[in-house]
Image (spheres, helix red, strand yellow):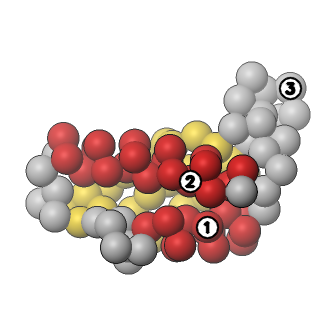
Amino acid sequence: MHEMSLLADLMKKIEMIADQENARRVSCVRLKLGALAHISPDHLREHFDESARGTRAESARLEITEMVDTQDPHAQEILLESVDVET
């Protein structure tokens, strides 16, 4: 359930960006996955696909960069790096 909470927050941010850009759809979402985030890229992708269903990000490409530095201050986080939209 922790993943669903994280993804709900992420989707709110994505939708907020789409609103600000007057976007009709989100075409790409780029995330950074912290080295200690306790979720695999594949698992994150599954949850993203589920959370995006019915939103402007439903068919968005998801690009995930895995961070390797366990000492990074964001090592436990999933960071929204950028969002590409279509207006």
Q: Quadrant of residue 25?
A: bottom left
- The N terminus - image quarter: bottom right
Image position, residue 7 (x, y; %):
56, 53
Image position, residue 59 (x, y; %):
38, 76
Question: Mark 1: few, some, or many residues within 10 Å (few <14, many ≥20)?
Answer: some
Q: Is residue 67 visible?
A: no
Kindly identify the amino acid type of the residue bearing the numbered disc 1: His
Image position, residue 13 (x, y; %):
40, 43
Residue 7 disc label:
2
Residue 71 disc label:
3
| Image: 87 above or below 69 | below
Kindly identify the amino acid type of the residue bearing the numbered disc 2: Leu
- Of residues 71 and 43, the one nearer the viewer is 43
Q: Are marks 3 and 1 in contact (CB under 8 Å)?
A: no
Q: Residue at x 62, y 57 (%)?
A: 4
Kindly identify the amino acid type of the residue bearing the numbered disc 3: Gln
From the image, tell me which residue sits under label 1.
Answer: 47
User: In the figure, is residue 70 to the left or right of 1?
Assistant: right
Q: Secondary structure at mark 2?
A: helix
| Image: 64 above or below 76 | below
* Labels 3 and 1: the sequence-earlier one: 1
3D distance between C-alphas at marks 1 and 2: 7 Å
User: In the figure, is residue 13 to the left or right of 19?
Assistant: right
- The C terminus - image quarter: bottom left
Q: Secondary structure at mark 1?
A: helix
Q: Quadrant of residue 70?
A: top right
Q: Residue at x 28, y 66 (%)?
A: 56
Q: Nearer the viewer, mark 2 or mark 3?
A: 2
Q: Are marks 1 and 2 in contact (CB under 8 Å)?
A: yes
